[in-house]
Amino acid sequence: MTISAPAQPMVRVLYDESRSDLRDPARPRPVRFYQWEPSRPSAERAPLVVVSHGTGGSGSAMDWLVRPLHEAGFRVLALDHHGNNFVDGYEPEGFLHPWERPRDVSFALDALARERPLGPVGAAGFSFGGYTAAALAGVRLDPGILRAVLTGAVPLPEIPEFPGVLEALRAKYPTDDAARRSLDAAGAELTDPRVRAVFLVAPGLGGLVTPESLAAVRVPVGIRWAGADTINPFEVDTRPYLEQIPTATGHCVGPDVRHDDYFAPEPADPAAPLRTGEEAVAFFREHLR
């Protein structure tokens, strides 16, 4: 895959005092992000696109999406979600408490807004990051379904990045009371009104969100999916977003494209990430004017 690396970003780590570090509850939650400023100064504030990585990934490895956005003149912010990134390791909540990810994005936007006024804001995400971007547009998890998954009533597919993740979560929250408290925020309203458009690539968790929240989304939503995706299959994960969000449009990037073509060293279709990045640029140019 011939995707050149984007320019070196500014790397920042801020701390969210309202939430705890997953390894040390006495410390605040770290929010690391990579920040690219436009290389061509302009009198107008450049639109900002926030990028959320997939399960176990990192904002530092989202070159196929960051590079074209940056080269097109956008400000770009790519996060490392605590407990779910390969830079500083995994914790079970990072994989099984998805509602914390959109809060990372809003926290980062708050920090940037304190420094200078934000221009138009969009959000883009791959896989688990697709849900993250959708949540910022108003999509909400169904706590009942999520509870069934976390209690084992509904089978949880094996997560290659963290085998035995459900057992690890139960060991960390051994009592029913502790598990219940950890789920209190599962169905929270996580809309960020600053986000004016979202772009979802092979989005995940489509079977865990509520139809009512999908139908209530009002910002433009662009969706791309891989035709041979067995990680986030179209019928289970993408179709709910595509068919139940009234503002959603999208298409398959190729019938033979796999989920891991976006990060594998030898993808079956090396051009798929390039096409997707170019289409993300066109989408945000249209909706973040």
Image: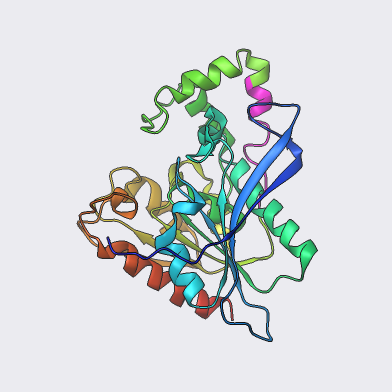
Position above or below: 173 against 160: above
Most extreme residue toward the front is 8
Q: Nearer the viewer, residue 212 or 282?
A: 282
Residue beneath the point at 44% across and 52% down: 61
Q: Which residues are magenta?
A: 179-190
Residue 205 locus on image (x, y percent): 46, 44
Give the residue at x 63% y 82%: 41
Which residue is outermost to the top?
A: 175
Q: Magenta span has 186? A: yes
Q: Relative to 26, is 285 on the left or the right? A: left
Report the colour scheme: rainbow
Residue appearing at x 63%, y 77% in the figure: 46
The foreground one among 176 and 45 is 45
- Left or right, residue 57 beside residue 170: left
Q: Quadrant of residue 120?
A: bottom right
Kindly give the residue lying farthest to the bottom in the view shown. Answer: 43
x, y percent for residue 264: 29, 49
Question: Does the magenta-highlighted stretch encompass residue 20?
Answer: no
